[in-house]
Image (tube, grey):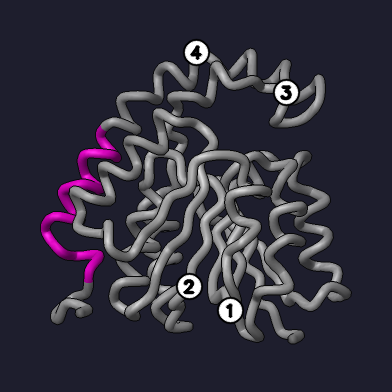
């Protein structure tokens, strides 16, 4: 049953897990900064996939609190009952999605490539009390999310940037009219995600879309054709 009061996002156990993960993410910033020169070189060679697993296997790189609140409010506004996340990482964004899903009587299906992150995310979701409304699948999202049933109400894209379009195209046939797709990092990885933004704003693929200046940038898209 959905909790009363301010909703799942403000439950003490949820806030405690979010605070713990955000402290860990903040502590990880110096290591990320030290790796930025290598990131720049990798991006010049061939996009985010060229960065290599060494920099991302343990990196948090989470959505901001503002972004988290935004996706929670968005999910609640559309009463999202089936939410799909590409790129769970340590589960910070998943906590916001799970809170919205539980409040609407829904469910979150996520995908994470790195086993250590998958294990930590599953443990954190359990600590927050969300095991009953989440399923995080380990492996390549093009395989692990292929059998997600329709209808999908909301999608969060926050994994490898070159996979945004392939993952989206795989999920589009399962989207309901009025569903929302939110893509993170459109300004942080402007070059890599330029094709995705162009596609979503083209007006030719069933979406109406706009770019939002939150943290690394969000592309907010509504599916209007079904």
Range of magenta residues: 8-23
Give the residue number, with chain letter if any, for mark 2: 82
First-in-chain label (4 vs 3) = 4
Does 145 sit left or right of 207 as displayed?
left
**Disc 4 vs disc 1: which is toward the camera?**
1
Residue 34 is tagged as 4
First-in-chain label (4 vs 2) = 4
Give the residue number, with chain letter if any, for mark 3: 50
Residue 151 is tagged as 1
**Distance Cα–Cα, label 4 vs label 1:** 43 Å
**Position of residue 155 measured from the top left corner of the image (x, y, whole percent):** 57, 64
- Which quarter of the figure is the C terminus placed in? bottom right
**Residue at 36% in and 71% down:** 101
Whether label 2 touches label 1, CB < 8 Å: yes
Q: Residue furthest front?
A: 147
**Distance Cα–Cα, label 3 vs label 1:** 34 Å
First-in-chain label (3 vs 1) = 3
Report the predominant secondary structure element of the magenta stretch.
helix
């Amino acid at each position: 049953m959905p909790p009363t009061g301010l909703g799942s996002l403000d439950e003490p156990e949820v806030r405690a897990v979010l605070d713990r993960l955000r402290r860990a993410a903040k502590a990880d910033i110096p290591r990320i900064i030290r790796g930025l020169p290598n990131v720049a070189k990798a991006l010049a060679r061939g996009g985010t996939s060229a960065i290599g697993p060494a920099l991302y296997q343990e990196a948090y790189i989470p959505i901001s609190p503002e972004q988290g609140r935004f996706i929670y409010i968005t999910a609640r506004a559309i009463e999202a009952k089936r939410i799909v996340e590409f790129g769970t990482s340590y589960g910070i964004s998943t906590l916001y999605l799970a809170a919205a899903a539980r409040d609407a009587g829904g469910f979150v299906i996520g995908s994470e490539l790195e086993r250590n992150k998958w294990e930590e995310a599953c443990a954190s979701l359990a600590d927050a009390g969300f095991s009953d409304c989440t399923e995080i699948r380990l492996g390549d999202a093009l395989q692990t999310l292929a059998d997600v049933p329709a209808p999908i109400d909301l999608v969060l894209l926050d994994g490898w940037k070159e996979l945004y379009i392939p993952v989206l195209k795989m999920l589009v046939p399962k989207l309901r009219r009025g569903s929302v797709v939110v893509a993170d990092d459109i300004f942080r990885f402007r070059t890599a995600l330029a094709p995705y933004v162009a596609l979503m704003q083209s007006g030719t693929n069933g979406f109406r879309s706009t770019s939002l200046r939150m943290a690394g940038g969000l592309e907010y898209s509504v599916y209007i054709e079904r």
